[in-house]
Image (cartoon, coloured by chain):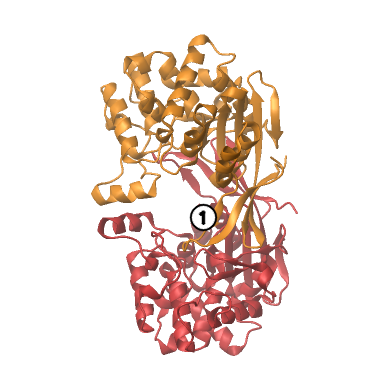
Chain colours: A orange, B red
């Protein structure tokens, strides 16, 4: 199936680049509210499902046992920018489970935040703590400790932590996810591909608490509250997820994933959102997510104006001159 | 027109992302040798035409007047990584024209090379010299000085330098490029959109020297020789353009441009190449260029093996685990 062009990038008088993709919006009963492009093909959700992957940590009482606060729960759901307070938060999480950064198996990369990376270069070097997934991994480690499971190989698909995560993903989305759709994510944990329509359904349930056991619904609500209260810990300075959740609080949950995936929930509307750009472009995925939020969330004039720079970002060159724009097409 | 999928990015058992695009290969008489997708739509060539933009510098005798060597001519054609020897070379070019970095109007960005950027952060901060286009701008400034033209606004479309560049682009490609296809590039100089088929034709002439005045053909040959001799100065460490030209020397000229554009020439075959990924992805543009080179350049077994990691790059995660691959489809 040919997915439609959802985003056009203009430069001066012409369209310079085009991004195709698919978008699913679902309610918590699994009814489709928006279906653009092929929403039944399997998609690796990557980091867009970190909040779902964090559910066992809360549901099993581990967040209480280790007294994880809102910042720490937000970090468990985060693709953070590696800024100093992110790193400190992850170290705190690990310390609460009696661990340190040597337990992380996410691998090392420099902070996503360029300014944090250059500041770090002045005084030291990157570690696994700076990996954008280190909060998720710290959450997995807390869960492994609390379960009495091995903490060396918590990233393997057959480890009790990942089995638990997979069962939660299947429960929320209704997708059956086996070896044939399993791949290795950037941070070495499994990523299971599933249709956007099922991801959207899962996020509708995550947002509304609908169709989940009471304990699971409570865990989802606590994670949403943590992200809404501490959105800087879900991403970081000048990041899309953070800006959206800072603006709309508990009314919108959004989470980016690699290769052009975005998931989200509009809890008051009972809707879940899942989208992917065919080509993996984050700039397009963001603009589409902003457009979907603008379409389904009731907004006052000020809120609509605040969203405009995210749905139609202006592109400036190295001298700050406006050279073009990113725009969402009528297909959304 | 729907351009075909030219590149698939796999993760584990599935295709994760797809890149569409168009490719033109032409001979120096303007005969099409390969046409994939829409090769008649206007495309901003961006930095892929820097070598053509450098022709007036050589043709007007400015390279001789300022004794610009091969490294400096390669820098005039470069999107360099901002490594120390790139920066030193650009400073040398400027000094030969009696200028310094304060004359550059390209804007400031940190080095493309991450390791160069972190090393720089330890001792200083970024300047216009680190901008990947600073060599091209130094070339424009040398030309402006030699022409006795103003050096403050050499980036404006109506400045003598840019008029000269535009005339060369029109002569080589046969495209008529007016205001209606003019936009501002990342470094503030004009970029004129033209069809891929015309760009490919222009690069065939650039490579073969065919259909150009003797002085222009000599300038093109001197620039090609400089890039073949000093390919590290055209890009930098571990960069695609550099790796290809280090491997094949004067047999292949390739140059990347922003937003998924690549241009090149196979001088011995008399062919020019121009391609663009619809979505602007550099990873896909590189793989396509490698596949086109592999198709049209006679290769021995060792050369074919050396190209494989560029046509079919393996993707590894932060732990070095192989997680997928980039592959060119049968459409090429």
Question: Can you see residue B74?
Answer: no
Circle 1: element type? helix
Residue positioned most to the right: B1
Q: Is residue B237 above or below residue B207?
A: above
Which residue occupies 45% across, 71% down?
B105
Q: Is residue A76 left or right of residue A88?
A: right
Between A238 and B244, which is closer to the camera in this rendering? A238
Position of residue B297 measured from the top left corner of the image (x, y, whole percent): 59, 66
Between A260 and B198, which is closer to the camera in this rendering? A260
Quadrant housing the N terminus of chain A: top right
Q: Is residue A20 above or below residue B217?
A: above
Position of residue B330 measured from the top left corner of the image (x, y, whole percent): 67, 51
Position of residue B22 measured from the top left corner of the image (x, y, whole percent): 67, 58
Q: Could you classify mark 1 by the number of other residues whose Cα lies within 10 Å: few (under 14), some (14-19), or many (20 or more)?
A: many
Q: How many marks?
A: 1
Q: Is residue B284 left or right of residue B89?
A: right
Task: Give the chain letter at badge 1.
Answer: B
Question: Which residue is disc 1 drawn over?
Answer: B310
Q: Is residue B72 above or below residue B256?
A: below
Q: Is residue B257 above or below residue A204?
A: below
Which residue occupies 41% across, 60% down?
B109
Q: Quadrant of residue A194?
A: top right
Between B194 and B12, which is closer to the camera in this rendering? B194
Position of residue A39 measured from the top left corner of the image (x, y, whole percent): 67, 32
Which residue occupies 67% across, 76% down?
B28
Q: Is residue B323 left or right of residue A1?
A: left
């Amino acid at each position: 199936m040919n997915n439609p062009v959802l985003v056009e990038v203009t430069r001066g008088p012409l369209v310079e680049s085009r991004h195709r993709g698919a978008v699913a919006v679902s309610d918590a009963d699994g009814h489709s509210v928006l279906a653009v492009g092929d929403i039944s093909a399997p998609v690796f959700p990557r980091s867009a499902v970190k909040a779902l992957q964090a559910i066992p940590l809360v549901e099993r009482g581990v967040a209480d046992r280790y007294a994880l606060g809102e910042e720490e729960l937000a970090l468990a759901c985060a693709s953070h920018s590696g800024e100093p307070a992110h790193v400190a938060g992850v170290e705190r999480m690990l310390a609460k489970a009696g661990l340190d950064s040597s337990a992380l198996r996410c691998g090392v990369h420099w902070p996503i935040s360029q300014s944090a990376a250059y500041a770090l270069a002045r005084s030291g070097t990157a570690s696994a703590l700076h990996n954008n997934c280190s909060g998720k991994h710290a959450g997995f480690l807390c869960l492994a400790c609390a379960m009495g499971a091995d903490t060396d190989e918590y990233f393997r698909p057959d480890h009790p932590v990942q089995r638990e995560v997979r069962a939660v993903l299947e429960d929320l989305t209704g997708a059956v996810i086996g070896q044939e759709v399993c791949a290795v994510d950037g941070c070495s944990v499994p990523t299971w591909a599933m249709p956007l329509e099922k991801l959207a359904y899962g996020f509708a349930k995550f947002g509304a608490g609908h169709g989940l056991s009471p304990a699971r619904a409570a865990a989802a609500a606590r994670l949403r509250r943590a992200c809404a209260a501490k959105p800087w810990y879900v991403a970081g300075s000048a990041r899309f997820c953070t800006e959206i959740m800072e603006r709309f609080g508990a009314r919108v949950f959004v989470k980016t994933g690699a290769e052009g995936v975005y998931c989200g929930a509009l809890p008051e509307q009972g809707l879940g959102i899942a989208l992917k750009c065919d080509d993996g472009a984050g700039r397009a995925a963001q603009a589409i997510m902003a457009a979907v939020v603008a379409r389904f969330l009731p907004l006052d004039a000020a809120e609509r104006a605040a969203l405009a720079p995210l749905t139609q970002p202006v592109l400036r060159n190295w001298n700050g001159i406006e050279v073009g724009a990113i725009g969402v097409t009528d297909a959304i």
